[in-house]
Image (cartoon, rainbow, N blue to C red):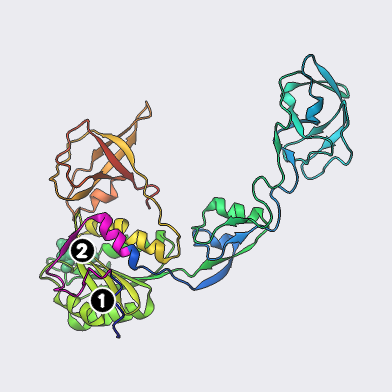
Amino acid sequence: MKKDAPLLPADVDPCDDPGHGHRTLRLDEARDRILEAVRPIEARETVPLRASLDRVLAGAVRSTVDVPSHDNSAMDGYALSGAELPAEGERGFCVLGTSWAGRPFAGTVGAGECVRIMTGATLPAGADTVVMQEHVRRDGDVAFVTPGHRPGQHRRRAGEDIRAGDVAVPAGTLLRPAHLGMIASVGVGEVEVFRRPRVAIFSTGDELRSIGEPLGEGQIYDSNRYSMYGMAARLGLEVIDLGVVRDTREDTQRAFEEAATRADAIVTSGGVSVGEADYVVETLERAGTVGFWKVAIKPGKPIAFGRVGNALFFGLPGNPVSSMVTFYQLVQPALQKLAGQASPDVPVLVKATCQSKLKKKAGRLEFQRGLLAREADGSYTVRGASHQGAGVLRSMSEANCFIVLPLDQETVQPGTVVDVQPFAGLV
Ligand code: AMP
Ligand code: MG
């Protein structure tokens, strides 16, 4: 496999004493360096509008029409000329007919005249104002209007949403339900999206067994491959599962080569700690450009980042919670950029009053697992999950948020306001 030009910033030499001389980076530093190194996918494909949900738009969608196409009513009521509104006293307007949504009134509204109008119906010629039906006294063919209305009220202008030629949705947008509606509103039925990135995942470790295999002494089931599948699939990526890779030179070499030829990104778990997994380090050195970084977060041991062949490479720690935390905080934004998203999603943070004591030492940014609740008075409270060990996956599966504790924070006493990153919206 040929070596690519280094894709890491010049001051980070990834091959400098790999696995040992860990540099310690802050999370934001590590994230910036990773994002800098990611080149978005350029391949595109055209898909029908519905199939574009959760894909990234490659070509801006421009409108061919004005939306709405005509001035129309925002209310059910009576359309008339604003100049005719009474300044004082009630005034009667002769009702000429009705303008329905999709079936406009053909005539013109003159002085002392009005037209019954429905929401979304075109304003007839001569009318620029709508009086809500609740504000009108109707007596036979006459509608009585009192003072207090404003000329031009309840009128939606043609092109108010978007004008012909305008960009309806810019390239690089992750298409959500509102975008599908927006694109449909300008009459476009097919869109150009970026090809979905292919992400290869595998777990390393001699102790790992796959579901269905009996467990021998000291062996555990491989859970990371499943949580990683879930995290990558949620991002709308194509996941290639390469299974468990044993700690042998041959298996490791084969797995990296296969992953690099089939995928745009490789995410592995396990085997990135100091003095461990010699084959991983050795293979990475041969196959690509990879650095080992210590990131000042907890949980999360050193992570490896770089390139193998043409694929981005992320080597995450093996502890099940560490691998999830590092995936969300470092890999997810990178994969969103790889997928063509113009800006990665901004994680939501809410303030909540912590109800439990949270043990912490200064020095690392911590992502403790917590349970966020909304109290009857509308305030948010949170308490820490009972077991905060990096290997205790139940702390993740029972939690609904990360409690984000800053680098220099020490033990949190009950009653303290903390930052919380809810899982909903993050995943
Ligand atoms: P490592 O990062 O390889 O040193 O692994 C750290 C811890 O995570 C060890 O206790 C491993 O047994 C465990 N671990 C590693 N990979 C996995 C996995 N795929 N599923 C579950 N646990 C794992
Ligand atoms: Mg291991």
Residue at 73% x, 22% y: name it: 135
Tell me the amino acid under the disc marked 2: Gly
Q: Please tell me which of labels 1 and 2 falls first in the chain.
A: 1
Magenta-span inclusion, residue 1? no
Q: Secondary structure at mark 1?
A: strand
Please tell me in which quadrant of the rendered image residue 287 appears: bottom left
Please tell me in which quadrant of the rendered image residue 219 appears: bottom left
Residue at 77% x, 42% y: name it: 101
Give how far across and how far down residue 341 sits, in percent.
45, 61
Give how far across and how far down residue 379 sits, in percent.
35, 30
In this image, 248 relative to 225: left or right?
Answer: left
Q: Is residue 221 visible?
A: no
Magenta-span inclusion, residue 29? yes
How many callouts does the rendering have? 2
Magenta residues, as a range? Answer: 9-34
Question: What numbered label is drawn on residue 318?
Answer: 2
Give how far across and how far down residue 5 sits, in percent.
31, 79
Q: Is residue 42 visible?
A: yes
Nearer to me, 424 or 59: 59
* Residue on which the image places disc 1: 289
Give how far across and how far down residue 160 sits, in percent.
66, 45
Asked if disc 1 and disc 2 are in contact, CB closer than 8 Å, the reply is no
Q: Is 33 drawn above or below residue 377 in the view shown?
A: below
- Characterize the local packing of mark 1: few (<14), some (14-19) or many (20 or more) Cα atoms within 10 angstroms: many
Residue at 35% x, 63% y: name it: 334
**If the picture is divided into quarters, which one holds ligand 2?**
bottom left
Cα–Cα gap, marks 1 and 2: 21 Å
